[in-house]
Amino acid sequence: MMVTINDVAKEANVSASTVSRVLNNTGTISQPTTNTVIRAVKKLGYEPNVLARNFRKKRTRTILILTPNMTNPFYSNIISGICDLSRDMNYSSFVCNTTDETQQIKKTLDMLYKHKADGAILLASEKGQHWLSEYAEEFPIIQCCEYDPDLDISRVSIDNYHAAVETVRYLIALGHKKIGMISSVNKYLSTENRLKGYKDALREAGLESTDRYVAFAGKDYNYQSGCRAAEKLLTQSDRPTALFCISDVLAIGAVNTAKIMGMCIPEDISIVGFDDVEQTSMFTPKITTVAQPCYSLGQKATELLCRKLEQNESIPLETILPYRMIIRDSTGPRP
Amino acid sequence: MMVTINDVAKEANVSASTVSRVLNNTGTISQPTTNTVIRAVKKLGYEPNVLARNFRKKRTRTILILTPNMTNPFYSNIISGICDLSRDMNYSSFVCNTTDETQQIKKTLDMLYKHKADGAILLASEKGQHWLSEYAEEFPIIQCCEYDPDLDISRVSIDNYHAAVETVRYLIALGHKKIGMISSVNKYLSTENRLKGYKDALREAGLESTDRYVAFAGKDYNYQSGCRAAEKLLTQSDRPTALFCISDVLAIGAVNTAKIMGMCIPEDISIVGFDDVEQTSMFTPKITTVAQPCYSLGQKATELLCRKLEQNESIPLETILPYRMIIRDSTGPRP
DNA sequence: TAAAAACATGCAATCGTTTGCATTGTTTAT
DNA sequence: ATAAACAATGCAAACGATTGCATGTTTTTA
């Protein structure tokens, strides 16, 4: 029923080892023999048994994708990039929701030890997870988007600091002087860097940076907590005329809250998001935002991981992809 | 380095077969021996080598998930259900974007033949794909949400026909007489059934059902084509006062288009979506919609597939899960 | 032209589990 | 009391591919 390497060997009048060498391009096989083998393979429609091969080579050709929540469009776009490229590279990819819980993450990564996967891509490592190194020492791991800068684990990301600086400079150029920010209570490096960029850009322009203008949403950037944060900022008598939000969903929350409070956007207040998920352009007004190249980030991470897996090539510690400001309708000159 | 079954056997003073039998609950092993073996397993921290086991058993414990596009939140919610449950059942799941292209689907399903996966869940089989049966005869396959009723392949879905009927009845109860529909040009059964339900509900109420009130968006339900379809319907002099859209994204497009045309929702026009993706409640007005239990649909499909895989149990051809109408702010009495 | 190097191939072990068959006691049924 | 059935275990052969080592042949080198 199933054609094995021995059937091919018999058909081609050579040994199984020869067939194996032809198929794997290992060892030295003469051209005539190679041809004979290839002909036999074609004739019998032979496909190497992946299970046997994996077993022998102790490799699964599977990569793990750890995400807090694949339902979040930001992550699903990255995952899409990973899945598509890994498929092309003949790898399977296994998506795991971890809800950012250490227990879940460890349990998932333990699949590496159990020979269920060869490597992993982490979409959102929080800072301070020193124990990650233990896995990274034994297995190839890539951090995508979020990473701990203190760990010696490869990462691919954008320059969050400068993205924030550029965004705030843009708001300043529009004449805004009272610029607020909606951040989050999570432990992601991007969050930290965007906050730093925001403050530095203000300082650079000689503007005060006050805690009254910074609010923190929940760690999962959810819509409701964006609304609450916006409310907190906008109910102040001396309220900001512009808001920089660290995610689009938060920005949408802020826009809705501002609307409910009777403001017009962008006439009364400018609001900027981050990520450029699809919703931003389905929303009215269309949200000005900083686009992350999600799909490419996923692809790049995959490419690096595969290179590491295939040739144990040493890969760069840090890969930075370009972000892009997209100016839409939610920002305008200072009222 | 790696602890094998032989190490355990030695430690427990039994043969490898005995250890294997204890671990797999096969054959007849006495209680004392079982205990000794279990103790040895614990002591050595033995974990069976998945690769060897898969090889021997000719199984991968991997399931394929075929989706047109995992970036679509409707699908990503289903996939989430599949991934989570399959992980709990000790299966890996492999998500593949197929963009609904036959070539891609076949190529992906061929992984079954190549022993890269044991079974598959299809999230969106179009009607008329008879060749699916060839795969289904050899491997367990479940159709989730969309399915071809003529094929003898298990499916889990909601009752789209009655969901549509109920929705249109609701609009009629609000007093609407001119009710339009935004459908799509795809070949999904759900699309067909929702259209049928729409027409039947109108007829039942003695209302005319005219082609002028039905517009077709692109096959991927994308926002832009929703806008265009809405425009087509609403520029008629005798335009509908209510719109039933077969997806939330289309409904959002319709709402935006209506707004641009100067209408108020729901005062001037009522609009209903379908699926209940997260965006519906982030949008103003919040969209009235029919909720599909996406996560549960994914879980159910997984449960059935696993049952089939594990015990070759015969599973029901059809499983229907309940939908739920969610009335929000985009619908109101006839103007 | 002899020795060394390179090439081409086959043999057989190996990867770690599972499982059919054989073996040895121990019950049970007649 | 004896055959038949069963329980508990071990032996060794798979599963299908890869690979170190051995062997024979050709080519290169000095």
Image: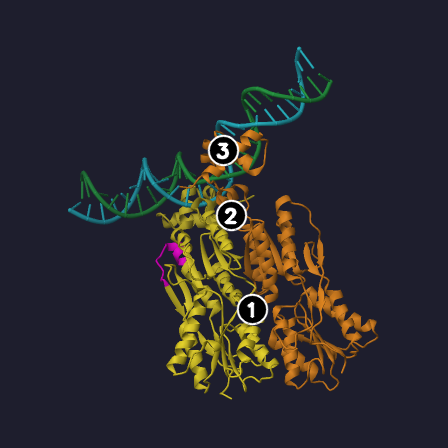
Chain colours: A yellow, B orange, C green, D cyan
Share a chain, discs 2 and 3?
no
Q: Earlier in the sequence, mark 1 or mark 2?
A: 2
Three-letter code, disc 2? Leu
> What is the residue that sits farthest to the bottom in this orientation?
A335
- Residue B288 x/y as whole percent: 69, 72
Residue A63 appears in the rendering:
yes
Which disc number belongs to residue A222?
Answer: 1
At numbered mark 3, what does the secondary structure look like: helix, strand or loop? helix
- Residue B271 x/y as whole percent: 70, 76
Give the left or right position of residue B259, taking residue B51 as reference: right
Q: What is the C-alpha distance between the residues marked 1 and 2? A: 56 Å
Residue A315 forms part of the magenta stretch = yes
Three-letter code, disc 1? Asn
Q: Is residue B6 above or below residue A152?
A: above
> What is the residue that sits farthest to the front in this orientation?
A237
Kindly report which numbered mark, 3 or 1, lies closer to the viewer in this rendering: 1
Q: Is B91 in front, or is A163?
A: A163
Which disc number belongs to residue A170?
Answer: none
Give the left or right position of residue C26, taking residue B326 as reference: left
Magenta stretch bounds:
A306-317
Residue under numbered circle 3: B16
Chain bearing mark 3: B
At numbered mark 2, what does the secondary structure look like: helix, strand or loop? helix
Q: Is residue A17 above or below residue B254?
A: above
- Residue C27 x/y as whole percent: 65, 21
User: How busy is the neighbourhood of tag 1: few (under 14 within 10 Å), some, or many (20 plus)?
Assistant: some
Residue under numbered circle 2: A44
Q: Is B208 in front, or is A208?
A: A208
